[in-house]
Image (spheres, rainbow, N blue to C red):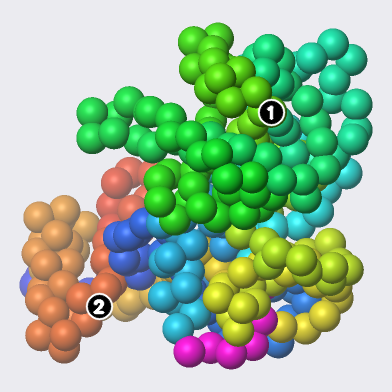
Amino acid sequence: MSWLQRVIPFVGMLLLLQRTPALTSQQFHLINGSLTWSEAQSFCRLKYTDLATVNNVSDRNELANTLGSHVTNSWIGLRKGNTPRWMWSDGRGTAQYTRWYPYEPSGDGPCVEVFVGGTWNDVVCGHGKVFACYETQPDGTDSYVFYSPRLTWEDSQEQCRAKHTDLAYISSDLNNSAVANQANAWKNNMWIGLFSDAWMWSDGGETSFRYWLRGSSSPGDCASVAVTQQGRWVAADCNKKSAFVCHGGLKAKKMFMRMTVRSDVDLTDSTISDALLEKLEMVLSQQSITDINVSWRRDSNGDAFRRQLKIA
């Protein structure tokens, strides 16, 4: 009697991999636990991608929707670093183009005005000045809109974000001349969207978008969303325990299952082992289990099974 005429045990390894849902935008996840900022960071990196990064106004709105009626402050992925950088209000990150007046920036303040002559100066943000907004057009180009009421830098930012895109972003001499010409026409120095801070995102993201609660003097080196303050951000003690927001899809879960199959057909034949795999997939589908991918773990010869023969 040949071995194919007997029932032979075969051993194989089945790989089960949980599918992750497709990412939509940032895909934020509120975790209603109680962890320090560092503990929350570790949790998010283990289960998702990282603590939440907020790139722009659209992300801020999505974050607000995720938090919904949640009423306690929640950690996001922003933490104070050691080195301040000059960045743009709209989230573009560190400034590549600058037009500083000689010996500027001098440390006078974290906000930037354009002199009537076109050079830039750092200054405290609480002064009232005229300001320049920019607006992205349907064709992708940017245009400037100028306002003569004298507002603080933060109030100017608020108005620009409400009515246009953000405070003015300047990337070339041509852009700078457009702003400087209006400042000169009004004989007033003008706010633009450049500011300085040392805050860094946990995932290494370069976005410079910020949404701080104005007038807040909360001490701390980690950022928390104050839901009761229209979702504004506040600095908080990193060791405080709080809920938190992760971003990214759930990481795939992988599991191996050792299978012993008694069969009178040769399961080392890939045609037969593939047919068995299709049968397993069909059974999972019938049980409405649709978020699992299954496959054989093959050996160096490409075999999914090996014969388990008894030695007499």
* Secondary structure beneath label 2: strand
Vertical comparison of 245 with 90: above or below:
below
Q: Amino acid at mark 2?
A: Val
Residue at 53 percent of width and 34 percent of height = 132
Please identify the residue farthest to the front as the structure is shown: 186
Mark 2 vs mark 1, foreground winner is 1
Residue at 58 percent of width and 90 percent of height = 71
Crowding at label 2, few (<14), some or many (≥20) Cα neighbours within 10 Å? some
Q: Amino acid at mark 1?
A: Asn
| Number of numbered discs visible in the structure rendering | 2
Q: Which mark is residue 39?
A: none
Comes first in the chain, label 2 or label 1: 1
Q: Which residues are magenta?
A: 69-75
Distance, label 2 to label 1, CA atoms, is 81 Å
Q: In screen coordinates, is 279 left or right of 262?
A: left
Q: Nearer the viewer, residue 5 or 250?
A: 250
The rendered magenta stretch, by its main secondary structure, is classed as: loop
Tell me residue 170's x, y (percent).
55, 24
Residue at 41 percent of width and 75 percent of height = 65
Vertical comparison of 185 with 124: above or below:
above
Residue designated by label 2: 261
Q: Quadrant of the C terminus?
A: bottom left
Residue at 32 percent of width and 60 percent of height = 24
